[in-house]
Amino acid sequence: MVKIGQPEVREVLPTEVPFHDSTDTPGVEVLTFAALTRRARGHGLDPFTPMRPAFHHLVTVTGGPPLHCAVDFTEYELTQHDWLWIRPRQVLQWRPDLADSEGTILLFPSGFLDETTVATAHVDSPAAAPTPVRSSTADRTARLLVDAHRDQTGLPQAIRIEIVRHLLSALLLHLASTAESSSTDPTNTVFRDFQLAVERDYAHRHRVEDYATDLGYSVRTLTRACRLATGHGAKRVIDNRVLLEAKRLLVHTDLTGTAIGARVGIPDPTMFTKFFRTRTGETPATFRSRVRGI
């Protein structure tokens, strides 16, 4: 499993993609990679252009060559048994090898799941950069889910939906547990509290001290929690969220750099350009032109 870095993207504005219910099992779709391509084209979409789906993607590779995709401007390579959980509203772009690799994609909105699963698996947590994971238990659960979704034994639809819902919940809980098992330090809770606060306030609050005061933690505690969870400090977590939103707005809107800076809490155009260039090595205008292929 490889997280490569910055991809070269030549496409233009991401397509907003709503969830389309299945008539057989409303609330969830289970597709092969080939079926996903056919489904996208059936809805008039190019499967290889950037898109912002309004629903979750659970992706796993079961065979063939590696699968490549970009999520929020980071490139991923997935090999056999890798799982990647892509959250709603993240900018997603499949690479052409989607047609060559083999695997399964589960599509579902958060509302399909019960409240306990949503809370325990942090389904509605801020959409951070996804991390590929491996879990043999998740693989086994997924096989049961795929079989249940395809079941043609004549079970009433309501029963089939509940079976699929429970298996999907079990799968998500296994994946969430695997993702968190690398660190059992209680400061993980501190980091989640901080991450939620940053997601809520990043557009107008950029000082670690302000978050520490509101959350009731010391700056040192926040910094330690962030370093354990991400490898860098609390200020970088804030800046990365501001930068991600700026990138999203540059790519999928035609707002000016000044307007985008104001939206992310940096209303001075010179300061916004300096912030963006310091962290990316290019100006907002250069980034927009490069990613759009202009």
Image (tube, rainbow, N blue to C red):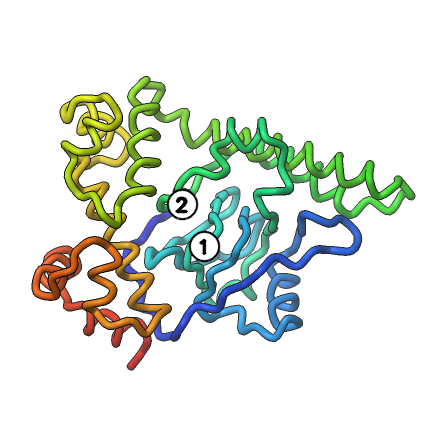
- Drawn side of residue 284 relative to residue 181, left or right: left
- Considering depth in this image, is 103 or 11 the residue closer to the camera? 11
Q: Position of residue 69 (x, y in %)?
A: 43, 59
| Amino acid beneath label 1 | Arg
Residue found at x 57% / y 51% = 63
Residue found at x 11% / y 61% = 268
- Drawn side of residue 39 relative to residue 282, left or right: right
- SS class, disc 2: loop
- Drawn side of residue 12 relative to residue 116, left or right: left
Residue found at x 20% / y 73% = 285
| Amino acid beneath label 2 | Ala
Mark 2 Cα shell of 10 Å, populated few (<14), some (14-19), many (≥20): some
- SS class, disc 1: loop
Quadrant for residue 201, please give it: top left
Residue 127 got which mark? 2
| 2 shown above or below 189 | below
- Drawn side of residue 207 relative to residue 69, left or right: left
Q: Is residue 140 visible?
A: no
Quadrant for residue 89, please give it: bottom left
Tell me how far mark 1 sits from mark 2, CA to CA. 8 Å
Q: Position of residue 286 (x, y in %)?
A: 19, 73
Q: Which residue is mark 1?
A: 89
